[in-house]
Image (tube, rainbow, N blue to C red):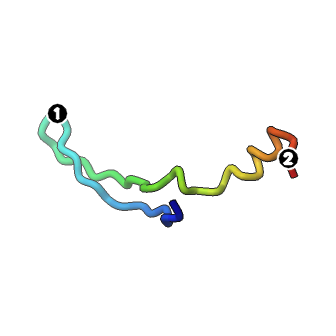
Amino acid sequence: MGRTPQTVVKVFTAPNGKQVKKNVELFTWEKLDYVAKVKKAFGLR
């Protein structure tokens, strides 16, 4: 817990043999961007 979310570039090989680069976000469960929405949904302050 307490890790900082970060984005890294990963290279994958597609079934057709081509390499595909994708930005992958790590530790998304550590984000706090839904705190206000969850509090509102449960009637919390």
Mark sitting on residue 1:
none
Q: What residue type is labelled 2?
A: Leu
Outermost residue toward the top in this view = 15
Q: Position of residue 23 (x, y in %)?
A: 37, 55
Category of crowding for the residue at label 1, using alpha-carbon neighbours closer than 10 angstroms: few (below 14), some (14–19), many (at least 20):
few
**The residue tagged with tag 1: helix, strand or loop?**
loop
Q: Nearer the viewer, residue 44 or 20?
A: 44
Q: Secondary structure under badge 2?
A: loop
**Residue 21: percent from the left, percent from the top?**
28, 52
Q: Which residue is drawn at 33% across and 51% down?
A: 22
- Residue drawn at x 50%, y 66% is 4
Which of discs 2 and 1 lies nearer the camera? The answer is 2
Numbered marks: total: 2
At label 2, counting other C-alpha atoms closer than 10 Å, the crowd grade (few under 14, some 14-19, many 20 or more) is: few
Residue 15's tag is 1
Quadrant in the rendering for residue 8:
bottom left
- For this orientation, the residue located farthest to the front is 1
Q: Which of 19 and 2 is in front in this view?
A: 2
- Residue drawn at point x = 74 percent, y = 44 percent: 38
Q: What residue type is labelled 1?
A: Pro
Q: In this view, does 6 lie to the left or right of 12?
A: right
Relative to residue 34, is residue 24 drawn left or right? left
Assess whether mark 1 and mark 2 are in contact (beta carbons under 8 angstroms).
no
Give the residue number, with chain letter if any, for mark 2: 44
Q: Which of marks 2 and 1 is nearer the N terminus?
A: 1
**Quarter where residue 15 is shown:** top left
- Closer-to-camera residue (2/29): 2
Residue 29 horizontal/vertical position (percent): 53, 50
Q: Is residue 15 above or below residue 8?
A: above
